[in-house]
Amino acid sequence: MSKPITELTSNRPVFEEHDPEEVLTTLNLGPTHPATHGVFQNVLQIDGERIVSGVSTIGYIHRAFEKIAEHRPFYQITPLTDRLNYCSAPINNMGWHMTVEKLLEIEIPKRVQYMRVIVMELARIADHIICNGILGVDTGAFSGFLYLMQEREFIYEIFEEVCGARLTTNIGRIGGFERDFNAVAFTKIEEFVKRFPAVLAEFQELFTRNRIFIERTSNVAAVTPEQALDYSWSGPILRATGVDYDVRVLSPYCSYEEFEFDVPVGTNGDVYDRFMVRNEEMTQSIRIIEQALEKIKGEPKGVFHADVPEFYLPPKEQVYTNMEALIYHFKIVMGEWETPKSEVYHAVEGANGELGFYLIHDGGRTPYRLHFRRPSFINYQMFAPMSSGMLLSDAIINMSSLNVIAGELDA
Amino acid sequence: MDKLNNQQLLQQLTDHFGEDITRHEEPYGLLTVHTNKERIIELLRFLKESVGFIYLTDITAVHYPEGENTFAIVYHVHNLVENIRVRIKVSIPVSDPKIPSATVVWAGANWMERETYDFFGVQFEGHPDLRRILNMDDMEVFPMRREYPLEDPNRVDKRDFYFGR
């Protein structure tokens, strides 16, 4: 109950009733706190600097994607997936396309698969750049963030070249890409692969042996593999605990089984390990992109989509002149396609973990039900329980290393 | 040792649960078994402790208003060592949407069940903290149920006669 204003402004000493030494303070961390990097709230009971208990409140940017998806044809759902994890939108786009392709049993040409791999790995690097850069900022080291941000900008330029958009990319279509990578895109990807390792090395040099950083992060929020699996963690934070679960390896999609790469794992599951795992994953992503560029050279040029006229929009100039193309165009846009009645679960390794699409289809224009298994949502639920007993400043960097993206959290 | 496949898994499940595995199918290679709410926790625990399905991937629900008006509660679980997934479905009537909570098996089921409650109104019995999670607390409906339209049909500021919404 709030007190009348006269009582609050009276001249009684504040400590008479509420000795700060004896009471717990309630702290509202969020919903728009600069340290939380996203719109979500934590109500924390703190004793001095130590957190006693916490309650997470989420849903501030809930946009009812699952409900909207029930009213939209497949290709209109891609822009919704952009807005899940908006730091690595292409992975979500590709995950959704592959889910539909799995449902429709569309065979994708190898060259398209390699192109997708390049785009997804670039997105993974962009996402890890954000997470590790911000982790540096939260521990008090700003410059590393700026070094890496420049490279993230370069990745966005590549996306711009590939699809025209930077953040919410809407890359690709069901069946492939909307257009081939142009020469500039290939040159930029090659340039990125060449110059990024040096920048990453410089970034790592700033942090990995930095005593301040190590003392701020090591043994902070250490999680055992058992706890992590109990809470269904996935992605880099699960691998930091020592569990080598990576969807790319366990259930390969997009020809990931042909690529040579390592899955880095940590030992302590603390913030430092998560940082190291993400750094190493960026190096591995570069390796994958190099191999994909090599593989693309061996594939027939100019193939950028599967030959599925029933599901892939025909080129615009043909729509104006060719009756068949016009019919297909109309049927696809209006969602008049023959689709199986079935259900499919497809998972991709998102930047934060297993990003799953559970699609139930009844043969209509729109999905009967679409559920997103969002890694941020599932990873974040351990935050409040694991914060008890932690210092407030440790909880902040713990949250930062979980890389909770509000869009993916709330869907 | 051979890798665990869908046939062996189904055999193990029917050996233990017999009649309670009411139906099964394999859409796109993912074994889907149907069971009832009386034995779901027992089944999940059996999968986790005896067959090695240590990882709970997801819990969600689907509303089927046609016919008997039911919810299907869908569990995806994953055996990380044998690398095999299984989907478990339980049908419960919308008029009495109660099912035991899986939080006793996996702590991670907590928010997945809260989300399912939030959108469908499924009562997970024994859940430690069954509150709304994404929608606001004073919301009165369960929006993912089929009877609720995407937008308020009485809105007058948004009319699109030609294409409908």
Image: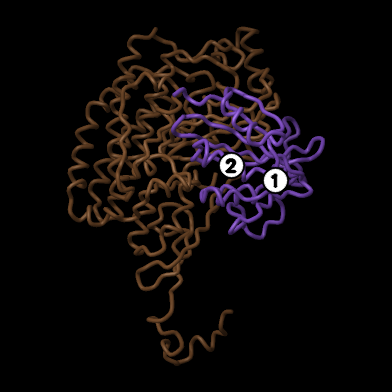
Chain colours: A brown, B purple
**Residue type for callout 1:** Glu
List x then y, in percent, for residue B92: 73, 43
List x then y, in percent, for residue B49: 51, 42
- What subunit carries mark 2? B
- Residue marked by disc 2: B44
**Residue B147 found in image quarter:** top right
**Residue B29 found in image quarter:** top right
What crowding class fits label 2: few (fewer than 14 Cα within 10 Å), some (14-19), or many (20 or more)? many
Residue farthest along the front direction in this orientation: B15
Q: Compared with residue A252, is residue B100 higher up or lower down, i.e. above or below?
A: below
The residue shown at (40%, 37%) is A351
**Residue type for callout 2:** Leu
- Residue marked by disc 1: B38
Looking at the picture, tell me which residue is in the foreground, A376 or B1: B1
What crowding class fits label 1: few (fewer than 14 Cα within 10 Å), some (14-19), or many (20 or more)? few
- What subunit carries mark 1? B
Task: Determine the CA span between mark 1 and mark 2.
Answer: 12 Å
